[in-house]
Image: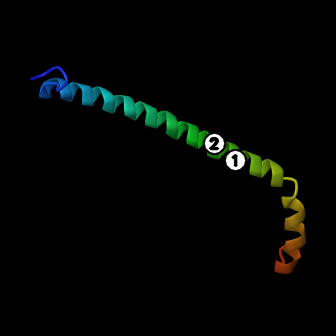
Amino acid sequence: MSPTNPTPSSRGSVATAAGSSDVGASAVEYALLVALIAAVIFAAVAALGGALPGLYESVCPAFGCGD
């Protein structure tokens, strides 16, 4: 075969090497996505954390849970 067309055996090893590299990149991308979601949840809880007790106290009597 010509140099521009690799043999089937070398083509398989290139695909295997590229496939394992993609798996590592996917794991890193998922880890970054999980970290971003965790940061957003943390920011939302920090921003709303002070307002939630007041909201609970204003809604609670309507349900009779403040007795």
Q: Which mark is residue 2?
A: none
Q: Is residue 5 above or below residue 47?
A: above
Number of marks present in the image shown: 2
| Residue 61 place in picture, x, y as percent | 88, 76
Task: Name the residue located 85 percent from the left edge and 73 percent from the top edge.
Answer: 59
Choose between 50 and 10: the one closer to the eye: 10
Mark 1 packing: few (<14 Cα in 10 Å), some, or many (20+)? few
Q: Are marks 1 and 2 in contact (CB under 8 Å)?
A: yes
Residue that numbered label 1 is attached to: 40
Report how far apart the C-alphas of labels 1 and 2 lie in the structure: 6 Å
Going by the numbered disc 1, the residue's amino acid type is: Val
What is the quadrant of the N terminus in the image?
Answer: top left
Q: Tell me the kind of residue under disc 2.
A: Leu
Quarter of the image holding residue 65? Answer: bottom right
Q: Which residue is mark 2?
A: 36
> What residue is rendered at 45% in x and 32% in y?
25
